[in-house]
Image (cartoon, rainbow, N blue to C red):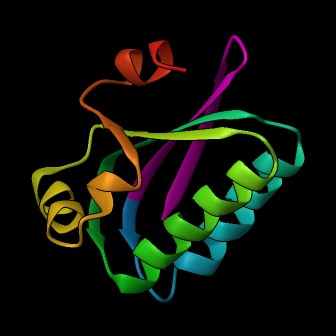
Amino acid sequence: MGVDKKVVGDITVCSLGGEININTSPELRRSLDGIIGQSAKKIVLDLDGVTYIDSSGLATLIEVLRRIKREGGTLHLCRLPDKVRSLFEMTKLTKLFQIYDAEETACANF
C-alpha cells in the first residue's frame, strides 16, 4: 500500500496504490489522519493504483470520510478501477462518496 501526496492549490491529492486490506488499512488510516491533521480541508483520493480492497479497506475510507466531514472538509474519490467501482456500487457506497472519473474533475467540483 502506497500513498503519494501532492498539493494542487488548496487541494491535497493522494494517489493510492496496491491493496487496501486488513493488513494495510491501519497504515492508510495513519497517513490520511496525518494529512487531515495538517488542516487539509479538500482531499482527493485517486484510487487508480488500487488492485484490491476488502471490507476493512472500505471501513477505513468511510472512517476517513467521517473524520474529514467533522473537521469541516470534503473528500472526493477518483479513477476507481472497474473492480473497485463495482464493489462501491454493490455496497451502495456510491451514494456516500463523491466519485469522479478524472482527478481534474474531482478537483474542479469542490
Highlighted magenta segment, given as a residue range:
1-17
Q: Quadrant of the C terminus?
A: top right
Residue 103 at x, y percent in the picture? 39, 24
Residue drawn where x is 51% and y is 57% of the image? 2
| Picture quadrant where residue 26 is located | bottom right
Give the main secondary structure of the magenta stretch.
Answer: strand
Residue drawn where x is 37% and y is 63% of the image? 18
Residue 84 at x, y percent in the picture? 21, 60
Q: Is residue 99 above or below residue 23?
A: above
Q: Nearer the viewer, residue 86 or 95?
A: 95
In this image, 65 relative to 31: left or right?
left
Residue 96 at x, y percent in the picture? 40, 56
Residue farthest along the bottom direction in this orientation: 22
| Picture quadrant where residue 52 is located | bottom left
Residue farthest along the front direction in this orientation: 95
In this image, 59 relative to 101: left or right?
right
In this image, 79 relative to 43: left or right?
left
Number of numbered labels in the structure image: 0
Residue drawn where x is 28% and y is 37% of the image? 79
In this image, 13 relative to 19: left or right?
right
Residue farthest along the right direction in this orientation: 38
Residue drawn where x is 69% and y is 56% of the image? 32
Q: Is residue 3 magenta?
A: yes
Q: Is residue 28 above or below residue 7?
A: below
Residue 43 at x, y percent in the picture? 61, 36
